Amino acid sequence: MGVTIVGLGPGDPDAVPAAAIAALAGAERVVAPPLPHGLLAVLGCVPEPLGDGPPPDGALLVAPDLAAHRLARRLPHAATLPDRGALRDRAIGAAVARLARVGAHLRVHCPWDREQTAATIVPHTVEEAFEVAEAVGSGDAVRQADEIGDLLFQSVFLAQLLEEAGEHDLGQIADEHSDKLISRHPHVYGDAVAEGAGGVRDLWERNKRDARGGGIFHELPAGLPALAYATKAQRRAASVGFEFAAAADALAKLDEEVAELRADPGQDELGDVLFACVAVARGLKVDPEIAVRLAAQRFRERVELAEALAAGAGQAFTELAPAAQLAWYARAKDGARDAVRHGPE
């Protein structure tokens, strides 16, 4: 018979779906995780406790939507009420609504949160965005989830400020953004054709340009970090076909710019080299911001290892001559752990 997982709504006794009540009315066996007393009163029965093992065959497994969705992911072959897609939607809605309630509560009861404005929050938003990028680069899923949560709350809090000003609320923002995404993906929701990810990006940029009536570089934010600004500018140009045909062409341009920098060292030529590097990154389908951050992290780890290796040989890295420091750095880069016993030649 299998198990059927029944979502009980967001957890509010007044919001239990009628379909869930109807399913419970004819159930022979009901199992549930711990439920609040108010929710139990609405159900009209006392469910058996859900243990650590699999739920009994043929039982209804009832829980608020968020817990029900987690159980459904754990039990991929179980039936669900509502269907899995709708249960996921309801679970996400309940969780985001709870986060929005926390934001609204903090605005009233926390002295620091009460003082904030959009202008004071935005620097934190930018910081959280960079921390998400760093977490993605680390490959640590748990850390990514934590940082994404921090960034999500930034959006929730900024939406709360708009709502307090009598403007858009979080629900309206999300709904209008869904409409925008649908309109920007006519190759998915309409009849347009886009070949590959590059074609999708070009179609996206063309649709944005047409919708806003701007030129090639419509609404290119001047305050973006340099790498992001360069990437976005190149992407806008690519949307009208102005880009290198292949990564090899971008690499050839980089070689050309490096030669010019050697011939005339200075800010302008260095800027051209960095801009050419962004073009190479686009050709390789690599985010230059993440690439540079990972390179900086690798550099830091190697210097720290070089310092540790030198210390193991009785040398203070910070007091060594540059050539000796570079020798230890080379050993750290090559992974020569035995350098602890043998100093650089």
Image: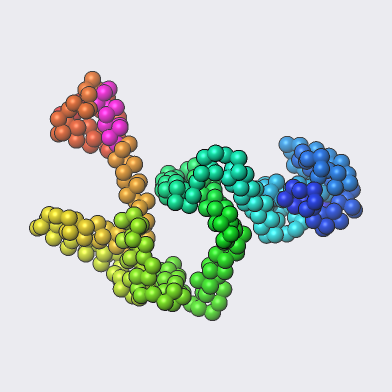
| Left or right: where 164 falls relative to 230 | right
Q: Is residue 138 above or below residue 203?
A: above
| Left or right: where 301 falls relative to 201 | left
- Can see residue 146? no
Q: Is residue 242 above or below residue 306?
A: below
**Which residue occupies the foreground of this view, 316 or 174?**
174
Magenta segment main secondary structure: helix
Residue lying farthest to the bottom in this orientation = 191
**Which residue occupies the foreground of this view, 280 or 121?**
121
Residue lying farthest to the top in this orientation = 314
Span shown in magenta: 302-312
The image quadrant that residue 164 belongs to is: bottom right
Q: What residue is rendered at 24% in x and 26% in y?
A: 310
| Left or right: where 272 falls relative to 175 | left
Residue 9 % position (x, y):
75, 52
**Is 121 part of what is drawn in magenta?**
no
Q: Is residue 260 above or below residue 188?
A: above
**Is 306 part of what is drawn in magenta?**
yes
Q: What residue is rendered at 54% in x and 53% in y?
A: 161
Q: What residue is rendered at 51% in x and 44% in y?
A: 115
Q: What residue is rendered at 14% in x and 34% in y?
A: 323
**Which residue occupies the foreground of this view, 206 or 251?**
206
Residue 319 % position (x, y):
18, 26
Residue 168 % position (x, y):
57, 61
Residue 93 % position (x, y):
65, 55
Q: Is residue 38 above or below residue 279?
A: above
